[in-house]
Image: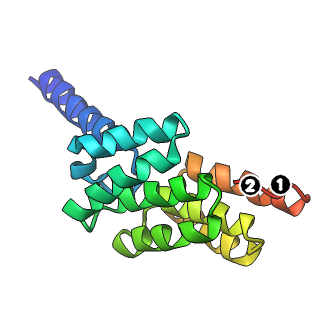
Amino acid sequence: MRSIMLTTISMLALSVSSAAFAAGGGGGGMANQQSATDPNYGAAKQMIDAKNYAGAMPLLQQVVAKDPKNADAFTLMGYATRKAGDANGSLQYYNTALSLDPKHIGAHEYVGEAYLQLDRLPEAEQHLARLDSLCTFGCQEYRDLKAAVAAYKTGKKPTN
C-alpha cells in the first residue's frame, strides 16, 4: 500500500512539473494553464522557435485578448519583440508580465538581457539579484543572465 501511495505521489508531482515545463512560462509558481492549452500560444512558441518573431505577435495578441492576465504570453511578446531587434519596445511586455507575476523567472531573465542591450547594467543586475532570490537552488534563467552580465562587463554587449 505504501509503495502505491509513493508511486501515486511521484506520478502527480511529475505531471505537475511536466505541465509547467510544457507551458514554457518560467513563472514563479504554476505556469499559466491557459497557455498550455491555447493553440495560439503553442503556435506562437513554434514560430518563435523558428525565429518567425513577427508572425508570432498576432497570435500572442489573441492570447492576451482572451486572457489579459497571461504573464507567459506577455513574456513571449517581449521576447519576440526583443529578438526582432526592438529591445526598448520589449520592456513594456516584460514589465506587464512582471506586474502580473512578480516571480516570473523567465521574464526576469529576459528583461535583464534587454537592459544589457540598452546599456542599462544596474537594472539588469537588479533582475539578476531577484533571480538569485527566486531560484533557491539555482536555475537556468539565473545562470543565463549571470553569464550575460559577466560577458557584458568584459565588453561583449549582447546583440539581441
Instruction: Look at label 1 and name its amino acid.
Output: Ala
Q: Is residue 12 visible?
A: yes
Determine whether the residue tagged by mark 2 lies in a helix, strand or loop: helix
Residue in front for this viewpoint, 123 or 74: 74
How is this picture coloured?
Answer: rainbow
Residue at (73, 77) in percent of width and height = 122
Disc number for residue 148: 2
Residue in front for this viewpoint, 73 or 150: 73
Instruction: Look at label 2 and name its amino acid.
Output: Ala
Residue 108 location, x and y as percent? 54, 64
Q: Is residue 135 visible?
A: no
Disc number for residue 151: 1
Q: Residues within 10 Å of mark 1 (few under 14, many from 20)?
A: some
Q: Are marks 2 and 1 in contact (CB under 8 Å)?
A: yes
Most distant residue in the right direction: 154
In the displayed structure, does residue 150 sit left or right of residue 64?
Answer: right
In the displayed structure, does residue 113 sit left or right of residue 32?
Answer: right
Residue 129 location, x and y as percent? 63, 69
Which quarter shows the N terminus? top left
Residue 125 location, x and y as percent? 69, 71
Determine whether the residue tagged by mark 1 lies in a helix, strand or loop: helix
Residue at (42, 35) in percent of width and height = 46
